[in-house]
Image (tube, rainbow, N blue to C red):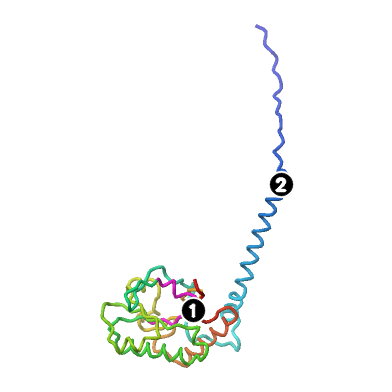
Amino acid sequence: MAQTPDEPLTLTVHSLPQLDQASAAAAASTRKGRWKMVGLMLVCAAPVIASYFMYYVVRPEGRQNYGELIDPQRPLPTWTGTDAQGRAVPLSSLKDQWLLVSVADSACNEACTEHLYLQRQLRETLGREKERLDWVWLRTGDSVLPEPLQKATAAAVVLQVDPQAVAAWLQPAPGQKIEDHLYVVDPLGHWMMRFPAKLDPKQAKRDLERLLRASSSWDKEGRPAH
């Protein structure tokens, strides 16, 4: 049988579909919008970044912090506490203010009482800047607060919380208990500093003043209305 001679294989190359002018313009507009959004975010974040750079990196006069800086910083957790009226209060709602935080059992022994006093005094000594700082007592246990203690902490944020939840967020220095420290949370909601046990009020006040001064360009007193 006669064989048909082989024929060479041919490939036909089809051109890719081209974007029409309207589609190309839409794509360019989308890219431009994205870059504008990135630019806007950078502009908004610049004062915050600058203030933290000045505090954490540029250290005038070779100074050292009294409080220990937390690295990495830890954001406010998502769980809730209970206020004096029995209402659930998300910890995240405490953002947009500097926070000076203590942790202690609701029975509030002598060390707890001293910390609450120091928190109040430190805040008061900040003068006009005190409105940018809230003092917070995260109390554990089921003891009912006696009336004198309720009155003494009327200006504080007092929340009954689960001790295990708190321990998963705030941590003491090695060899210390969580109740031994005061903790600083920034307005962005990050735990960023831990004061030593047996607090020196003068040095703690100096740290707080520096933090408030470094953030004065972007942090204002009070929380924005929602």
| Three-letter amino acid code of the residue under disc 1 | Gln
Q: Which mark is residue 22?
A: 2
Magenta residues, start to end: 90-102
Percent coordinates x, y for residue 68 in the rendering: 47, 81
Q: Left or right? Give the position of 55 relative to 93.
A: right
User: How far across and down, in percent of the image, does residue 57 sit?
Assistant: 59, 79
Instruction: Determine the CA span between mark 2 and mark 1.
Output: 48 Å
User: Is 169 in front, or is 8?
Assistant: 169
Across and down, in percent, residue 187 comes to: 50, 77
Residue type at numbered disc 2: Ala
- The image quadrant of residue 14 is top right
SS label for mark 1: loop
Bin the neighbour count of mark 1 within 10 Å (Cα to Cα): few under 14, some 14-19, many 20 and up.
many
Q: Residue at label 1?
A: 97
Q: Residue furthest top?
A: 1
Image position of 49 with respect to 59: above or below: above
Name of the residue lying farthest toward the front: 225
- Give the percent coordinates (x, y) of residue 217: 60, 80
Question: What number of labels is visible?
Answer: 2
- Residue occupying the point 41% across, 89% down: 120
- Per the rendering, the mark at residue 19 is none
Q: Does the magenta run of residues contain 93?
A: yes
Considering only order in the chain, which callout, 1 or 2, is on the residue closer to the N terminus? 2
**Cβ–Cβ below 8 Å for labels 2 and 1?**
no
In the visual, does 211 lie left or right of 180?
right
Label 2: few (<14), some (14–19) or many (≥20) C-alpha neighbours in 10 Å: few
Q: Residue visible at 66% across and 60% down?
A: 35
- At a point 50% along the width and 86% down the height, the residue shown is 208
Quadrant of image for the N terminus: top right
- Depth check, front residue: 55 or 190: 190
Secondary element type, mark 2: helix
